[in-house]
Amino acid sequence: MRILGVDPGEKNIGTAISDPTGTIANPLTVIKHTSRAEDAAAIVHLAAEGEVGLIVVGQNLDDEGLPTFEGRRAARLGGAIRALTDIPVEFWDESGSTQSARQARIAMGVPRRKRRGHLDELAATVILQSYLNAQSSEQLTVDSDQ
């Protein structure tokens, strides 16, 4: 099953999609933020186009695990997405995803002058890959318990 990852931002919304096995996340596209309703419709369109079975929305959490201001905004976007589709929507802690995306660009050897600009689709990829890894390790734990 393909999974769509969403990194909601103030100006841009990064998206990533998994391979059909739900193992590897790949950057997809960046949606320019316009309004919650239009953003949700664009995300649902991408989900339908990619034949995804789950949408994972990154949500900022504070030290106590509660949504921050940005996290509450992500929750409202998730609610708008749910209102437009039957595809399940889950939230995933996105803390540090942009920093991880920045580090990935450095590790890939991207020159400093080319590292400027948005990291939204890479951050979405980091969020989705984190989700996929957690699901995979959870499945391994379940399998070893049986």
Image: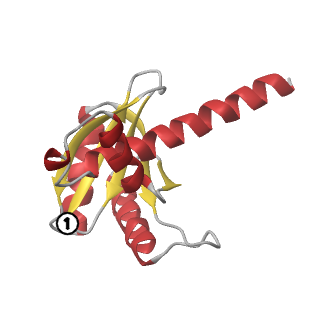
Above or below residue 118? Residue 111 is: above
Query: How far across and how far down the image is residue 15, in percent?
Result: 29, 45
**SS assignment at label 1:** loop
- Give the position of the N terminus as an image quadrant: top left
Is residue 129 left or right of 17 when viewed as pictured? right
Query: How far across and how far down the image is residue 28, in percent?
Result: 25, 37
Q: Which residue is mark 1?
A: 11
Q: Amino acid at mark 1?
A: Lys
Q: Is residue 87 in view from this perspective?
A: no
Q: Quadrant of residue 83?
A: bottom left
Q: Residue furthest right?
A: 146
Query: How many numbered discs, if any?
Result: 1
Q: Is residue 49 in view from this perspective?
A: yes
Nearer to us in this view, 105 or 25: 105
Residue at image point 39% right, 65% down:
74
Nearer to us in this view, 146 or 120: 120
Is residue 73 left or right of 35 when viewed as pictured? right
Residue at image point 52% right, 35% down:
132
Residue at image point 52% right, 72% down:
67
Residue at image point 51% right, 42% down:
130
Q: Quadrant of residue 38?
A: bottom left
Q: How is the image coloured?
A: secondary structure
Query: How far across and how far down the image is residue 60, in percent?
Result: 47, 65
- Give the position of the C terminus as an image quadrant: top right
Query: How far across and how far down the image is residue 46, in percent?
Result: 24, 41
